[in-house]
Image (cartoon, helix red, strand yellow):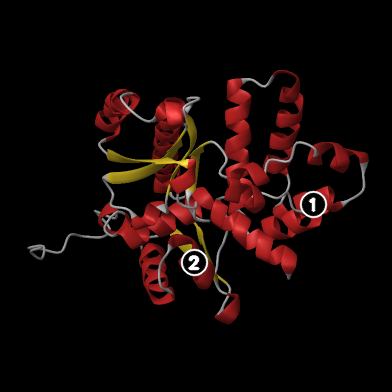
Amino acid sequence: MRPLRENKSVLKYPMDVVLGSPATVRLLRVLIYEVGAAVSVPEAARLAGLTQAGARRALERLQQIGIVQCIGSGRNRVYEVCADNPFVELLAQLFDEEYQRFQTFLISLRDLFADARIVSAWTDFLESQPADLLTVKLVLTPEGMGAWQSELRENLLRIEQKYGVIVELEFYLKADAPSMDEDALLLWGVPAQDAALRKRPKRAEVLAFVAAHPQVIVRAKRYLSRLLDEGQGTADADIKEWLEMLDSYSAKQIIRLLASDSERAQRLWRSEPFLPVLTNEEFSELSKFEDA
């Protein structure tokens, strides 16, 4: 790639910095959309999938153009977005569109695979796959083997064209099906090895995990908003109460309330929104935490 002919003014063109590298985009996604709170350099690096040195350089660049600010000093130094920066709300909208597009893509796949001839369907770790190629593994019943597979591929073509991605399908019977990795994304069905992974942990353990991973609360809000939009009948009142609490209380207040023995805590916990939004990787981490 040829170097740029001239250096553009960062004052005039701050978006060159904001969108100029995957590292800055990843960090902004973490700070603005996934966590929504101040994070340290090590935490930002972990969440964004960067080295600490790379995360620090990107955060410093974002600080220089006024989108991110640094709070504290030494080991207590953390970074957060400047809420009054005019670009922050617009970037949040972009990240929300990005999230909704991917969720719609997953829904399209799940609707396609919701067939009695498919026992389970999943895709391995997304980050390790090419940007325009997704491999999905399907475990079929004996009735699913044969000409029907061509029909499935034809229906899949419309999804591929809409989202600009190629979806490769691998077909198996139960006898020769591979195991589903912990970081795989389940699309349909429940593989046997996944059932053990999804063993329901205790409330105290879930709350401790949420306290250490504030991005789970942000995801829980989106999950509840989606449920409310879809309409859950008699459950709508509980969903609204959860949303009001997650919007109004700090993370510490939420944990303190839910850890209590009050009637409200007991009632709310029956519809808790944290476990449904955990990834397989996070369930695995939670399982290890349980054993600790």
Q: Quadrant of residue 97?
A: top left
Give the SS element for disc 2.
helix
Residue 278 visible here: no
- Reading the image, the residue beneath label 2 is 46
Looking at the image, residue 146 sits to the left or right of residue 190; the answer is left
Image coordinates for residue 3, horizontal then vertical, percent: 10, 66
Image coordinates for residue 51, horizontal then vertical, percent: 41, 73
Looking at the image, residue 188 sits to the left or right of residue 291; the answer is left
Image coordinates for residue 249, horizontal then vertical, percent: 73, 46
- Reading the image, the residue beneath label 1 is 203
At x 50% / y 43%, what residue is drawn?
A: 186
Front-most of 188 and 220? 188
Looking at the image, residue 158 sits to the left or right of residue 226; the answer is left
Q: Residues within 10 Å of mark 2 (few under 14, many from 20)?
A: few
At x 76% / y 29%, what residue is drawn?
A: 238
- For residue 221, the mark is none
Residue kind at label 2, given as amino acid type: Arg
Q: Residues within 10 Å of mark 1 (few under 14, many from 20)?
A: few
Residue 230 visible here: yes
- Quarter of the figure that contains the N terminus: bottom left
Does residue 282 lie above or below 236 as drawn?
Answer: below
